[in-house]
Image (cartoon, rainbow, N blue to C red):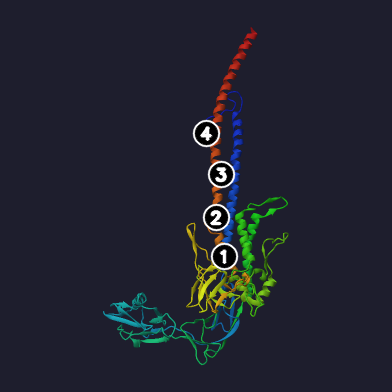
Amino acid sequence: MSDYTSGQVNFAGLGNGTDFNKLIDGLVKVEQTRVTRLENWKQEWQDKVDAFKELNTKMLALKSSLDGMDTLNEFLVKSVASTSTEELTATADSSAQEATHSVIINQLAQNAVLTNQNGYLATNEVIASGAGTVFEYSYQGTAHSLSIPAGTTLDGLVNLINNDPDKGNVKASLISDGSEVFLQLRGMDLGSSSTLTINAATTVPGFSSADWDVTQANQNAQVRIDGWPVGDWISVPSNTIKNVVEGLTLNLKGAAPGETITLTVDTDQEAVKENVRTFVKQVNEVRSYILSLTKYDKVKEEGSLLTGNYGVDIISQKLKNAAAERGVGFFFYDLTGAAPSGDKYSSLSQLGILTDADDSSPTNGLLVLDEEKLTEALKDDTDAVAKLFAVKNEGAVYNTNDFVYKSFIEGITKPGAYNVKYTVDGSGNITSAFINGHAASIDNTTHQIMGLSNKVLVGDRLVEQNNEAGIVLEVLNLAAGTYPASGTNDDDYPKILLKQGKTGEMSDLLKDLTNENTGPLHILEDNYEDIMDMIDKKIEYEENRITKMERTMRLKFARLDALLGDYSGKTAQLNAQIAQLNKS
């Protein structure tokens, strides 16, 4: 603790036989228990901060996993089988329907290739001996001219062409037949418009327009799909064809005139199931960790490290709510009207995903998946299952034919279900409109209503208060009146919907919960760091106090030891004098 323990002031019975070192060390040790208690107290806070960081890491890992399946194309896996993979393969996105398609490939798309007829024995052979020589070609209708310096070799011409910044998408190369080398020009684009020709202005000997063979003609691909077009071909400048069949991308590999190739599109239900299993597993990773931090032992009547911690409880409850509640912008399926309305699947429980509430179960508090129920749901409506998980900003209306959804603003409009009310006068003009209870803008030229923005300053940030800001609907019923009529229950209100699947919903939630400025764990972590700083100051104060106390004690006991030694000497003298007196 100080220099006094290093031998500068050290006494072990020097004055009177009393070991004051042992006495002082004992007193210091007693005082040191205050520091030990503070250090233990600080460690408790540090353990909580470490747990927060680990929980935050697990939530970020969950978000990353969810982000990998938060679109229909990622979640709803479609497979395509071809009866001739040598000529044709295809891929399908989520919009592709389960069906078979017939395809005839009359020809592939090709690029133009020109090869010079004159062979050379060496690549360093000079092909332009005089000045003022020109090499000119046209690609896709644009002429490209190069001045060829005297002494240019075959290799040099290739480099001049390839390094010309104005060469177009053309590449020059040398090919050999084993004895001679030939110059080849290759247009790099496919299709009938990607023409490549040598111009008459070329003056390089042996490279005039008549000295070249068209070794491959540029052309479009030609296909017929499902018998269309009758008597003609779909002609495209690519061997990858999109948008002819919704959701399908055709990859042409070989021409097969007259041969019909069949493509069969199916939903890979096992891949969809695996996505659902991954969802459940990753959510349970976070739930399990939270349970380990907050569990309460009824037998021992003691809690865990973060039992009752309000920040962790907030996170736990929000994650539970996201899993248990109806999907954002989704509504329960209603078959009572003239036509079905709502969503066939609007909550995870309908797919067999529930929280285990059995206290005696090893999975208590975790999500459990009923595979049989999920299989039944997928057989019934695979697209509806996928939408509940991965639909992203899909607009719709509920319980009305009076208006239709038009658009929203990315990054501004929040997913949700919003009540709509509007009034039309006798001239067919909309006179008032409300979305989500807030006044909306009106355009009587297009008969459109749009949710308005209402940003407010929160701290140093502008925060949008109206979740419906930017959503647009078009009114179809322009008969005079107010829609809906007064007294309509909230559940019966006509609504405009912007749907978001569970993966996206939970990803957005996790983004907020792990925010380094506003996330509850980060706020608590900052608070706990302040507490630990305060404890450090207390520890420093106590250590300084104990050091001073020890120094003071050693000085006092040093003086006491000296005094006792003096008295001991005097006592010995007196005893000797008394002994002499007794002898006399």
Which residue appears at 59% of the width and 57% of the height?
A: 55
In-front residue for pair 441/565: 441
The furthest residue to the top: 584
Residue 170 drawn at (x, y percent):
39, 79
Give the secondary structure at mark 2. helix
Q: Residues within 10 Å of mark 4 (few under 14, many from 20)?
A: few
**Amino acid type of disc 4?**
Asp
Say if 292 sits above or below 147 in the image.
above
Kindly report which numbered mark, 1 or 4, lies closer to the viewer in this rendering: 1
Query: Separation of disc 1 and disc 4 at Cα?
Result: 59 Å
According to the image, label 2 marks what residue? Answer: 522
**Amino acid type of disc 2?**
His
Image quadrant holding the C terminus, namely top right
In-front residue for pair 518/36: 518
Which residue appears at 55% of the width and 89% of the height?
A: 227
Query: Separation of disc 4 and disc 3 at Cα?
Result: 26 Å
Query: Separation of disc 2 and disc 4 at Cα?
Result: 43 Å
Q: Earlier in the sequence, mark 2 or mark 1?
A: 1
Q: Residues within 10 Å of mark 1 (few under 14, many from 20)?
A: many
Query: Separation of disc 3 and disc 2 at Cα?
Result: 20 Å
Give the label on residue 535, or none.
3
Residue 489 drawn at (x, y percent):
63, 70
Image quadrant holding the N terminus, namely top right
Q: Earlier in the sequence, mark 1 or mark 4?
A: 4
Which residue appears at 60% of the width and 59% of the height?
A: 315
According to the image, label 4 marks what residue? Answer: 3
Q: Earlier in the sequence, mark 2 or mark 4?
A: 4
The furthest residue to the left: 131
**Amino acid type of disc 3?**
Ile
According to the image, label 1 marks what residue? Answer: 507
